[in-house]
Amino acid sequence: MRLTTRTRYAVRSMIDIALAQADRPITRDEIAERQEISPLYLSHILLRLGKAGLISSAKGPGGGYRLLRSPEEIRIADIVRAVGEPIDLVWCTGRERKRQCERIDTCAAHLLWVRLAECVRQTLESVTLAQLCDEAKRLMAEKEKASQAET
């Protein structure tokens, strides 16, 4: 199982915006450079995050992206849904499945997939952007401390 780059980049971008937003709006190019993401690809991701009501954008000098809600209010599941990533792991567990699996009533594996998808969903719902920002700050502090120890 793998999350798409769109989802991984969306989460990283939201962390970037949240960490830097106290100072000023953050431009697409700043995010792209720090996160090593193609600016064009990032534009599509930021557009989806904006349509989902997670970020706002302002054009022109002094423009950029800001969070519309506090990091404590944004769940990682919100970000995943915003970029259109299905949380369900296999098509037969999807809440919006368009077709019914003929084996669903007798498939023991289906029960496992449902449980696994629910664990993933609960994890994504339980983690906030603020928690990831705290982890990012801790990791940056550890890296700085290690860098200072080397000199």
Image (cartoon, rainbow, N blue to C red):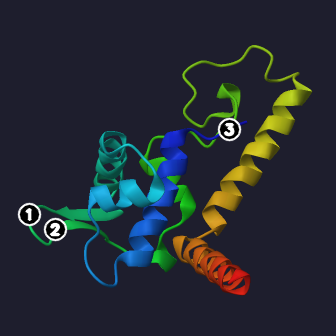
Q: CA distance from mark 2 to mark 1?
A: 5 Å
> How packed is label 2: few (under 14 Cα within 10 Å), some, or many (20 or more)?
some
**Amino acid type of the residue that numbered disc 3 sits on in the rendered structure:** Arg
How far from the left and from the top, in percent, is residue 11? Answer: 51, 57
Whether the residues at callouts 2 and 1 have beta carbons within 8 Å, the answer is: yes
Q: Which residue is depicted at the point 29% across and 68% down?
A: 26
First in sequence: mark 2 vs mark 3: 3
What kind of element bears circle 3? loop
Residue under label 2, please give it.
63
Residue under label 3, please give it.
2
Of the pair 70 and 30, the residue shown nearer to us: 30
Q: CA distance from mark 2 to mark 3?
A: 34 Å
- The residue sitting at the top extreme is 102
Q: Which residue is depicted at the point 29% across and 46% down?
A: 43
Of the pair 114 and 21, the residue shown nearer to us: 21
In this picture, is 75 found above or below 41? below
Residue 3 can be seen in this image: yes
Whether the residues at callouts 2 and 3 have beta carbons within 8 Å, the answer is: no
> How packed is label 3: few (under 14 Cα within 10 Å), some, or many (20 or more)?
few
How far from the left and from the top, in percent, is residue 108? Answer: 91, 28
Q: Which residue is depicted at the point 69% across and 81% down?
A: 142
Image quadrant occupied by the N terminus: top right
What kind of element bears circle 2? loop
Q: Quadrant of residue 96?
A: top right
Q: CA distance from mark 3 to mark 1?
A: 37 Å
Of the pair 102 and 121, the residue shown nearer to us: 121
Is residue 33 rendered to the left or right of residue 64? right
Residue under label 1, please give it.
60
In this picture, is 114 found above or below 100? below
**Amino acid type of the residue that numbered disc 1 sits on in the rendered structure:** Gly
Image quadrant occupied by the C terminus: bottom right
**Amino acid type of the residue that numbered disc 2 sits on in the rendered structure:** Gly
